[in-house]
Image (spheres, grey):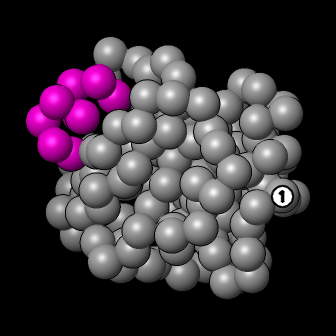
């Protein structure tokens, strides 16, 4: 993997899934200036609030063939393996994909970030141990608390 920051405000971003993991991804996407599309039959209250506020476009329904076509970046974030497989099978070369359920199927991953005024620290375990990344993030955040 090659670490890089991407300006996503001009990209078409799709999140398939409406639960806890999708909500966590959406938090960062919205903060980065994206207005993602969310496809899920059920969504968290937070996702519904974002949709009501116009921060995401919500298509509250099952994933359908062709749904990934217009998107530059796709997040697969459901707890339904058949749905995740269907999304993955539709992806075309050049699309950025983050499969939160099978890290090896994605071509990018998110870093855990500690943001401070002076800069940002990125942390990764390359998808192998999110709990450790979270632990390191908390420790670094405490270490840099007085900047």
| Residue 142 point in image, percent of width and height | 38, 39
- Above or below residue 2? Residue 83 is above
Residue lying farthest to the left in this orientation: 53
Magenta region, mostly helix, strand or loop?
helix
Residue 102 seen by the camera: yes
Residues drawn in magenta: 47-55
Residue drawn at the location 28% of the way across and 45% of the way down: 56
How many other residues sit within 10 Å of disc 1, few (<14), some (14-19) or many (≥20)?
Answer: few
Which residue is under mark 1? 89
Per the image, is 54 magenta? yes
Q: How many marks?
A: 1
Hey, which quadrant is residue 7 in on the image?
Answer: bottom left
Which quadrant holds the C terminus?
A: bottom left
Q: Nearer the viewer, residue 80 or 119?
A: 80
Q: Residue at x 30, y 61 (%)?
A: 34
* Most distant residue in the front direction: 65
Q: Would residue 95 appear left or right of 40 to someone viewing this image?
A: right
Which percent across, then down, holds residue 11? 39, 74
User: Circle 1 sits in a helix, a strand or a loop, which is it?
Assistant: helix
The residue sitting at 22% across, 25% down in the picture is: 49
Above or below residue 80? Residue 68 is below
Eyeballing the image, is 130 above or below 91? above
Q: Is residue 60 left or right of residue 110?
A: left
Q: Is residue 140 visible?
A: no
Q: Residue at x 40, y 50 (%)?
A: 37
Horizontal and vertical percent position of residue 137: 51, 44
Q: Nearer the viewer, residue 44 or 2?
A: 44
Is 51 contained in the magenta span?
A: yes
Q: Quadrant of the N terminus?
A: bottom right
1 relative to 145 in the view: left or right: right
């Amino acid at each position: 993997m090659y670490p890089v920051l991407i300006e996503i405000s001009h990209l078409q971003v799709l999140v398939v899934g409406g639960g806890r993991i999708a909500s966590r991804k959406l938090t960062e996407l919205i903060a980065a200036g994206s207005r993602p599309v969310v496809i899920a039959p059920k969504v968290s209250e937070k996702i519904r609030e974002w949709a009501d506020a116009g921060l995401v476009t919500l298509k509250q329904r099952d994933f359908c063939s062709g749904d990934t076509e217009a998107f530059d970046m796709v997040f697969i974030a459901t707890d339904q393996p058949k749905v995740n497989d269907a999304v993955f099978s539709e992806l075309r070369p050049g699309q950025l994909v983050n499969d939160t359920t099978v890290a090896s199927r994605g071509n990018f991953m998110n870093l855990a970030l500690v943001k401070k005024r002076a800069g940002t620290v990125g942390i990764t375990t390359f998808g192998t141990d999110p709990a450790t990344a979270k632990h390191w993030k908390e420790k670094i955040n405490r270490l840099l608390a007085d900047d």
